[in-house]
Image (cartoon, rainbow, N blue to C red):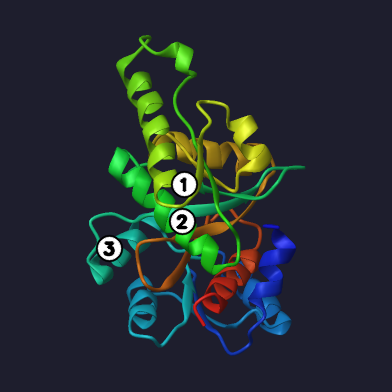
Amino acid sequence: MLGPDFILAKAKGPDRRIGIGASVDLDRVEASVSIANSNGYGRSQVYHNPSEMVRDLKEGRLDAAVRGSLDSNLVMRVIKDEFSLASVQRMALLQPRNGRMFFLAPVGVDEGWTYEQKLELAINGARLMRRMGVEPKVAFLSGGRKGDLGRHPVVDRTIEDAAKLAEACQGLGVEAYDRQILIEEAAKDCNLIIAPDGISGNLIFRTLHFLGDGKAMGAVVLNIDKVFVDTSRAKASYLDSIAMASALVGTRK
């Protein structure tokens, strides 16, 4: 079952080379690295230059990288440039307080705004989960219930998209459901939740993590052939994000 213990068990691998960025809170980053190294969650080193870290990842001198406390906009720009991406796709691993752990996407405000982008997120996310040994069960959310059709054109589009997306995923061999606006139901039995768009996904993430005291291990970038885990600079420790990066490296062996 997807959970912190599941991730930590897969994180063991002291030979895995992991970079983590630091621009502020250097003590917190270095403390996380020290604990991760002593626990065997890879062999981490600290980078202060995001371009150097992403380039080392791309060219194979690192097996994985973690954003750490580097500026998000700067790091995402470097990833786009180095990997020639029009946009970055991220999928966050979250555990609400007293709840089940699940993946959530999109989590960037500029991500997942079209039907095609959401379908790509779901398929890429399901592929990564299967590499981890987790069978994906996807829930597509919308801006309302089906009975809300006609109240607003934007809400209508999300309702229509969610139904078509679930059907498309099922046709591609991925278990998927249209859960309308009922995130509380989706979180009970699904392990990948796709929000209606990047703003709502980002708000779900921030509400669960910063207001609801939920755990956020990090957000993996889906559309590159390397392991990169995005993080929040507000984290008290980066240990779980380093462990997540190491666990993802293990799925590629």
Q: Nearer the viewer, mark 3 or mark 1?
A: 1
The amino acid at mark 3 is Lys
Q: Residue at x 43, y 54 (%)?
A: 90
Q: How far is the residue under mark 2 from the one under mark 1? A: 9 Å
Quarter that holds the N terminus:
bottom right
For label 2, the crowd category at 10 Å Cα-Cα, with few meaning under 14, some 14 to 19 and many 20 or more, is: many
Dots 2, 1 in contact, CB < 8 A: yes
Front-most of residues 80 and 12: 12
State which tag comes first along the sequence, 2 or 3: 3
Res 125 label? 2
Dots 2, 3 in contact, CB < 8 A: no
The amino acid at mark 1 is Ala
State which tag comes first along the sequence, 3 or 1: 3
Rendering coords of residue 230 (x, y %)? 47, 60
Q: How far is the residue under mark 2 from the one under mark 3? A: 19 Å
Q: How far is the residue under mark 3 from the one under mark 1? A: 18 Å
From the image, tell me which residue sits under label 1: 105
How many numbered circles are shown? Answer: 3
Q: Residue at x 35, y 55 (%)?
A: 73
Query: Up-down: is 160 above or below 168?
Result: above
Res 80 label? 3
Rendering coords of residue 83 (x, y %)? 27, 69
Identify the image quadrant of residue 214.
top right
The amino acid at mark 2 is Gly
